[in-house]
Image (spheres, grey):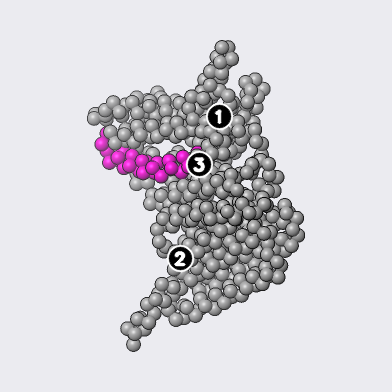
Amino acid sequence: MNLQLLSLYEQAILVLAAMVLFTSFALLAQTRIANLIRLFAWQGILLSATTVMVAMVSKQHHLYISGLLTFVLKALMIPWMLNRLAIRLDIHRKVETTANQTVVLLGAAALVVFCYYVALPIAQLSAGITRNVIAISLAVVLLALLLIITRRKAISQVVGFMSMENGLFFAAVVSTYGMPMVVELGVAFDVLVAAILFGVFFFQIRASIDSLDVDRLNRLTEAQEVEE
Amino acid sequence: MAGDLTGWLLALLQTLLFIGSAPLLTGWVKVVKCRLQNRAAPSVLQPYRDLRKLFRKEVVLAANASWIFRSSPYILLGAMVLAAAVVPLIAVHLPTAVIADVIVLVGFFALGRFFLALAGMDIGTAFGGMGSSREMSISSLTEPAMLMAVFTLAMTASTTNLETVVQYILDQGLVLRPSFVFAILAVMMVAVAETGRIPIDNPATHLELTMIHEAMVLEYSGRHLALIEWAAQIKLMIYGVLVANIFFPWGIATQATAATLLVGILAIAAKLALLGIVLAISETLVAKMRLFQVPRFLSIAFLLALLSMLSHVILETGG
């Protein structure tokens, strides 16, 4: 594909897509809870900017609504809720201990290559200029999954889960110019409800094991037996 | 034949301008940094005065210094001058650029660094050896990142020759490339680490435990020290010019007329002044890192370079 044949807006879509991928890597590298949430908000902002750009280029007007919805929910509301939760749970200044960062990041790079390989036949079916971005959106999903696997704090795992939803939404926007409006609205509010429910769960988990470290859930029964 | 001769003459002049103005860039960064930190700034020409002072001073050699210690400053400066000759500063289509490509440029840096590290260990003091080992461990992390960024450039322009890369980007006009966004960040991070600036190393430090570059050159004095300082200034300039002229080549002279050359000089001066301000701001905002954090910093640089390569393959050529 010849990059200089694309219009400046189309080039901007590609740059924004690459930056969304970068935020996924940054999420993996970030160990501070507060910064993790802030990065997640940035991913939402970039995602909504990409959506608006795609709307402009493809003249699909309903994508403007999606972009706005993404901005309000994923860049403002959910990060704000997560941040408030982190402050109330008194973990927003905590630094999480993770597995070997460099290995995780290199594994993430390998995942991106894998996604490119997997998405190649799909991209050939699509005709839009955004077809190359499908691999990126798939990579965002898998990197979020990697984030969930490597983290132990429940709140980081929720950020990973939300980031995964970002990846799926991104895939929908770039491969088919968005889902039907009803589905999109439904998913958006599901995510919002999920964020609220996760908040309740955090308090439940903390009340029962005195920590948000989900690894300790494995030891729960034994610990109680010892106490008794 | 005459055209060839003017080409070589221009190349020579460009290299002289390059190494002549390198202390100016260092002075400029220092002035901006002082202003930002509310200190009284020295003159922009202070690095020249320092060099002149050092050149006049007597060389003090340790009793057990070998030929490596004595010849290293010259080899280092020689490698940097050769590297400067390869980088297009104000004009492209010069005969020197055909001789060597960007991989050779990285090689010149490695050569200079190798001899400096040897010289650091030559006297046998603890600090020299410590500085050398630190320098080598950092460079083993910066080089892959640098080369990865370079390969992205090479894949975009289908060449490793710097001049052709610049010409290619000039021909294409303004194209937003995701790969270049990451490559420029990676090169900047590598440049900070390679030239020993904050947050990796503090060029003004005399605190022994945190020194890297300074620890290696602790035993040097007089004109040897002047040559090493000058080489370090040229290295900073080379990285600045690489960032300025490869990613934003506009203004560089493509024909050898007086007017275009003047525009080239003005353009590169403006770009370097701007980069100097960026460097000073980042040095003011960021605190120096612990040595054990440096691999993390550099692994991010490598990751950015890798991302730039990936986004080049996926977004710019794929499909």
What are the residue bounds of the magenta stretch? B123-150
Which residue occupies the extreme bottom position in the image?
A228
Cα distance between the residues tagged 1 and 3: 16 Å
* Among the two numbered marks 1 and 3 on one chain, the one whose residue lies closer to the N terminus: 3
Q: Residues within 10 Å of mark 1 (few under 14, many from 20)?
A: many
Q: Which chain does the residue under circle 3 lie in?
A: B
Q: Which chain does the residue under circle 1 lie in?
A: B
Q: Main secondary structure of the magenta part?
A: helix
Q: Which chain does the residue under circle 2 lie in?
A: A
Residue B202 in view (yes/no): no
Label 2 near label 1: C-beta < 8 Å? no
The residue pinned by badge 3 equals: B149
Quarter of the image for residue A22 reads bottom right
Horizontal relation, residue A32 to residue A3: left or right: left
Secondary element under disc 1, as helix, strand or loop, is: helix
Q: Type of residue at label 2?
A: Ile
Residue B163 has which mark?
1
Compared to residue A53, the image places residue B240 above or below, namely: above
Locate residue B270, reporting x and y percent: 61, 34
Locate residue B243, reporting x and y percent: 55, 38
Q: Type of residue at label 1?
A: Glu
Tell me what residue is drawn at x 41 percent, y 72 percent. A215
Secondary element under disc 2, as helix, strand or loop, is: helix
Cα distance between the residues tagged 3 and 2: 30 Å
Q: Type of residue at label 3?
A: Ala
Cα distance between the residues tagged 1 and 2: 46 Å
